[in-house]
Image (cartoon, grey):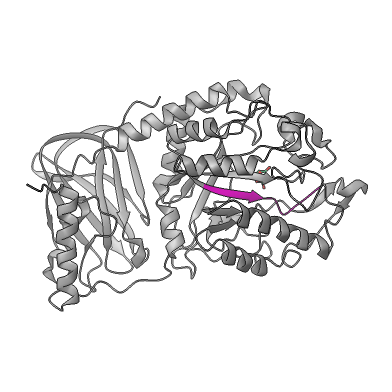
């Protein structure tokens, strides 16, 4: 006898409903609203938490910004083990990892043909090592996505400031983007120009942030070489910087954003009015979701003096709610040490955080609730509120076009204790909802539990203390277009770490 799981049953009934729609028996889906995510952005937004790996000569000189005059021989992480790093990151719930292939010091972690400031001239593995290759291989073996950070500013390169350096920078990108398999993200930071070694010139070189790099051309090149990668910078074009290095998104944090330069003119990496990056702008013309970068330690690079200052699992959990919980993604930096491994303190913290995420979000405690909605699009089951609980990424509850406020009740059938609420919009149809409230039935009336604004790819509400409910009501109180909501879930929080 063939048995099918609940998930397979739901998928097959959805397929049937989909066919019914295609055959003309069902109601048409809502028209998309406003700016929309690309396929790459959709995929990226589902990843939630990724790791950043800051690693270079600074790890050995105890600096945060190297001048570019380091002797490459000092780079010698004798115990470097990419598998161990990737496994520790996975235990922390990280879905992808981004390596600083070149930081501002210009030292390249792969044997590039473009400069002598690289692993090829280091003492590590007799100059035969390739951090990029080991990391890319380990990530692919352990089913983790991999990405690159290539600092545009290069304090070592003699050509920095001239057009020749742009050719070098693009050659470096080409080596990284064509030699190491598929990448999920390409990261350009905005720190640009200033003092440096510059091949011995020891000068101050300033560049025009808007024109020097000719970013549109570079981005086109990246698209050609890694069409599935998202490109990050202060201004996108796919993912925007959240405007601070504390890992905290604005509340609300809209996925839409039209970057403007500091002086109100055109924006570019290193030249954006960051006051608006944190929250985005409602109804902006571009889908440009925020990424929240933050280090697990005070600095981006490993320093022995900071071993006792590693963020605790509870602190990481709090950052998760303030980034992922507001619809952004979290990019958590965990810097390898001089041995080429993550330190025990960081590994322990990652493990605690990973266990917290797994323990908390394993089961939607409302999954088996009976649902009832005040409005269902065309009274068609295809858009019924049961889809809020089916755990499927592409199904959703929707209303008719002219409805912008509507309620769904959830009869939990028993008393359920929970502390976290999660909502997800069907963002392939745009960001539609502006405000909502969650209530519980208490005695003989509905009593508010929480209210909030933006949802987008995700909204998490962490209550101050667990509450108990047998019936819940979600009220969409304001929407710019008829709501299309993918998920309603409640969870009981695990102890962090
Ligand atoms: C900044 C850099 O200056 C920092 O060193 C760090 O790499 C951070 C993520 O980006 O622009």
For the point 57% across and 65% down, the residue is 223
- Residue 127 in the image, given as x and y percentages of width and height: 75, 37
Against 243, is 332 above or below? above
Closer to us: 109 or 236: 109
- Residue 44 in the image, given as x and y percentages of width and height: 45, 54
For the point 85% across and 57% down, the residue is 159
For the point 13% across and 68% down, the residue is 380
Q: In which quarter of the image is residue 310?
A: top right
Closer to us: 332 or 77: 77
Closer to us: 60 or 435: 60
Q: In which quarter of the image is residue 273?
A: bottom right
Instruction: Pick the quarter of the image with the C terminus.
Output: top left
- Residue 213 in the image, given as x and y percentages of width and height: 73, 64
- Residue 2 in the image, given as x and y percentages of width and height: 10, 48
Residues drawn in magenta: 146-155
Q: Is residue 423 left or right of residue 138?
A: left
Residue 50, can we see it?
no
> Is residue 246 a member of the stretch shown in magenta?
no
Q: In this view, does 279 lie to the left or right of 432?
A: right
Extreme residue in the right direction: 201
> Is residue 147 a member of the stretch shown in magenta?
yes
Against 134, is 231 above or below? below
Q: In which quarter of the image is residue 420?
A: top left
Q: Is residue 405 left or right of residue 56?
A: left
């Amino acid at each position: 006898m063939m048995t099918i799981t609940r998930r397979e049953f739901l998928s097959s009934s959805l397929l049937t409903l989909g066919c019914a729609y295609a055959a003309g028996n069902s109601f048409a889906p809502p028209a998309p609203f406003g700016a929309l995510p690309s396929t790459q952005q959709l995929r990226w937004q589902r990843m939630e938490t990724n790791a950043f790996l800051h690693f270079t000569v600074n790890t050995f000189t105890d600096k945060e910004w190297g001048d570019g005059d380091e002797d490459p021989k000092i780079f010698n992480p004798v115990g470097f083990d990419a598998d161990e790093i990737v496994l520790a990151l996975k235990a922390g719930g990280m879905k992808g990892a981004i390596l600083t292939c070149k930081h501002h010091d210009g030292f390249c972690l792969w044997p590039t043909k473009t400069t002598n400031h690289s692993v090829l001239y280091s003492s590590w593995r007799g100059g035969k090592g390739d951090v990029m290759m080991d990391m890319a291989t380990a990530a692919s073996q352990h089913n983790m996505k991999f990405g690159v950070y290539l600092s545009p500013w290069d304090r070592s390169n003699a050509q920095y400031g001239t057009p020749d350096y742009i050719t070098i920078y693009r050659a470096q990108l080409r080596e990284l983007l064509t030699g190491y398999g598929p990448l999920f993200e390409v990261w350009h930071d905005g720190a640009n120009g200033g003092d440096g070694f510059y091949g011995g010139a020891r000068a101050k070189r300033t560049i025009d942030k808007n024109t020097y790099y000719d970013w549109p051309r570079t981005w086109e090149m990246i698209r050609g070489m890694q069409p599935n990668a998202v490109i990050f910078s202060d201004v996108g074009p796919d993912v925007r910087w959240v405007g601070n290095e504390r890992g905290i998104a604005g509340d609300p944090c809209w996925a839409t954003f039209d970057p403007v330069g500091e002086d109100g003119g055109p924006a570019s990496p290193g030249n954006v009015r960051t006051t608006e990056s944190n929250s985005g702008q409602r109804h902006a013309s571009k889908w440009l979701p925020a990424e929240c970068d933050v280090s697990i330690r005070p600095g981006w690079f490993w320093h022995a003096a900071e071993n006792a200052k590693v963020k605790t699992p509870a602190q990481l959990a709090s950052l998760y709610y303030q980034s992922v919980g507001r619809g952004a993604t979290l990019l958590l930096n965990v810097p390898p040490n001089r041995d080429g491994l993550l330190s025990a303190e960081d590994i322990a913290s990652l493990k605690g955080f990973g266990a917290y995420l797994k323990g908390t979000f394993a089961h939607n405690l409302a999954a088996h609730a009976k649902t009832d909605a005040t409005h269902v699009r065309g009274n068609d089951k295809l858009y019924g509120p049961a889809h809020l609980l089916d755990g499927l990424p592409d199904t959703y509850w929707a209303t008719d076009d002219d409805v912008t406020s509507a309620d769904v009740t959830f009869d939990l059938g028993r008393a359920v204790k929970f502390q976290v609420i999660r909502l997800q919009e069907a963002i392939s149809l745009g960001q539609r909802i502006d405000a909502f409230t969650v209530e519980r039935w208490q005695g003989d009336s509905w009593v508010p539990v929480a209210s909030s604004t933006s949802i987008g790819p995700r909204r998490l509400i962490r209550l101050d203390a667990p509450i108990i409910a047998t019936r819940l009501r979600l009220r969409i109180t304001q929407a710019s277009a008829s709501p299309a909501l993918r998920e309603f879930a409640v969870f009981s929080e695990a102890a962090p770490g």
